[in-house]
Amino acid sequence: SAVISQKPSRDICQRGTSLTIQCQVDSQVTMMFWYRQQPGQSLTLIATANQGSEATYESGFVIDKFPISRPNLTFSTLTVSNMSPEDSSIYLCSVDRQGGTEAFFGQGTRLTVV
Amino acid sequence: GNSVTQMEGPVTLSEEAFLTINCTYTATGYPSLFWYVQYPGEGLQLLLKATKADDKGSNKGFEATYRKETTSFHLEKGSVQVSDSAVYFCALSARNTGNQFYFGTGTSLTVIP
């Protein structure tokens, strides 16, 4: 299994500001994934982060709004930029260590924008 | 494309009742299927999985069988407990999409004493 530490676990932020979420994995992984879970909704993939290359964003998500860093094989950050109340969600980091046979998740960051 | 359709909730059951949460999928190729559980205030945890047709995943009294003929992966438990109250997500992973995971909308389960 993989142990994923994500922080902060929750935050309340003012609109117009930015928040950076950190994700630390206890072992090296090739790909890391960032998901958004809006209230009462399922998970939506934001982007896939590979070490040494730019993140790949899903339709509806752009780098200017959700810049991602992946400096090494155990760490990634997601920034939610210029926040609005519509960005209030749970953001989840995930890794896939077994070629698609299992995904592991961090505990999530519960973001509230006021 | 790949997608997962999951029974909508919320579901409320009495303790010791039988649970079924329906899940069907659409996928090209041969996906792996999963059930994840999210307890209040926590991230997702893998509950069980099946990687090929007719496999049965099981854990903590929950079971699900990979049915290729009906493209289904229904979650069942014979006797639920209050501690099973959580949101359950059906998901698939397919190699033809780089092992990306696709999630259903989640089913909220509340078990009352």
Image (cartoon, coloured by chain):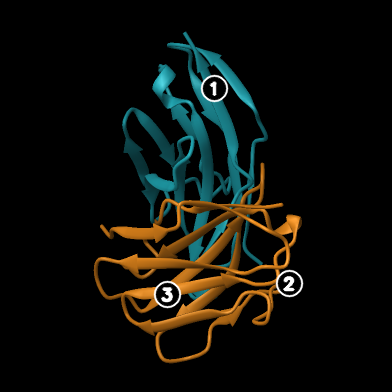
Chain colours: A orange, B cyan
Around disc 3, counting alpha carbons within 10 Å, would you say few (fewer than 14), some (14 to 19), or many (20 or more)? Answer: many
Q: Nearer the observer, disc 3 or disc 2?
A: 3
Q: Is residue A102 something one can see in this rendering?
A: no
Residue at the image point whose x is 60% and y is 46% from the top: B24
Please tell me whether residue B64 is drawn above or below residue A114 in the rendered image.
Answer: above
Q: Is residue A92 something one can see in this rendering?
A: yes
Same chain under badges 1 and 3? The reply is no
Query: What amino acid is at disc 2?
Result: Gly
User: Disc 1, disc 3: CB below 8 Å?
Assistant: no
Q: How far from the left and from the top, in percent, is residue A41?
A: 66, 47
The span from disc 2 to disc 1 (Cα, nearest Å) is 33 Å
Q: Which residue is mark 3?
A: A76
Residue at the image point whose x is 31% and y is 31% from the top: B60
Q: Which residue is mark 1?
A: B110
Q: How far from the left and from the top, in percent, is residue A59?
A: 71, 74
Q: Nearer the observer, disc 1 or disc 3?
A: 3
Q: Secondary structure at mark 3?
A: strand
Name the disc covering residue A95, or none: none
Query: What amino acid is at disc 1?
Result: Thr
Camera-side residue of A19 and B41? A19
| The N terminus of chain A: image quadrant | bottom left
Q: How far from the left and from the top, in percent, is residue B113?
A: 47, 8
Residue at the image point whose x is 55% and y is 48% from the top: B69
User: Disc 2, disc 1: CB below 8 Å?
Assistant: no
Query: What amino acid is at disc 3?
Result: Ser
